[in-house]
């Protein structure tokens, strides 16, 4: 199974991605736990691509690729931004960051996915889930 979509960088388009994840979850009969992990991590990554990568510029696109193989689900989210150094993102659980309202997206993606890889200077994030 493979699904590819492209959305403009408007937060309203997160609904499109959510619907695809919902439909895919039913089609694959994902457990509630796996579904929740996939949904939250994918929405975080897509929101980051829209807001931080593409700076909410509706002229820029976010691509979402979903690939299901024998025992894993791989989701790639790509933006058209300038990239970022994902190795320098502060730990939101450290005392100096604990009360900040932002900065938890990558932390959540790492915790919820079975594997996460960044490509193209941070413009592409690949989330892997065992299913």
Image (tube, rainbow, N blue to C red):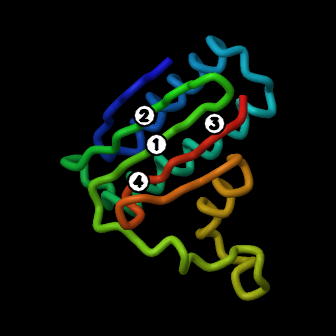
Pointer 2 with pointer 1, Cβ within 8 A? yes
Pointer 4 with pointer 1, Cβ within 8 A? yes
Estimate the x, y position of residue 79 in percent, counting from the top left. 33, 52
Q: Secondary structure at mark 3?
A: helix
Give the residue displayed 40% in from the left and 71% down from the top. 84
In the visual, does 8 lie left or right of 51? left
N-terminal-most mark, 3 or 4: 3
* Residue identifier under label 4: 124
Mark 4 packing: few (<14 Cα in 10 Å), some, or many (20+)? many
* Residue identifier under label 1: 76
Q: Secondary structure at mark 4?
A: strand
In front here: 13 or 66?
66
Give the residue displayed 64% in from the left and 54% down from the top. 109
Q: CA distance from mark 2 to mark 3?
A: 14 Å
Q: Secondary structure at mark 2?
A: strand
Q: CA distance from mark 3 to mark 1?
A: 13 Å
* Residue identifier under label 3: 39
Give the residue displayed 23% in from the left and 49% down from the top. 60
Estimate the x, y position of residue 8 in percent, counting from the top left. 28, 41
In the visual, does 26 lie left or right of 10? right
Q: CA distance from mark 4 to mark 2?
A: 11 Å
- Check the image and name the residue furthest to the top: 27
């Amino acid at each position: 199974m493979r699904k590819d979509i492209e959305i403009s960088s408007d937060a309203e388009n997160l609904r499109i991605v959510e619907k695809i994840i919902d439909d895919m979850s039913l089609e694959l009969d994902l457990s509630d736990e796996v579904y929740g992990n996939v949904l939250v991590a994918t929405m975080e990554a897509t929101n980051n691509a829209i807001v931080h990568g593409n700076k909410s510029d509706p002229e820029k696109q976010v691509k979402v690729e979903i690939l299901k193989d024998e025992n894993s689900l791989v989701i790639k989210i790509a933006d058209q931004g300038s990239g970022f150094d994902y190795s320098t993102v502060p730990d939101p659980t450290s005392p100096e960051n604990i009360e900040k309202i932002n900065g938890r997206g990558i932390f959540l993606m790492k915790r919820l996915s079975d594997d996460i890889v960044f490509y193209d200077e941070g413009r592409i994030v690949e989330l892997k889930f065992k299913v």
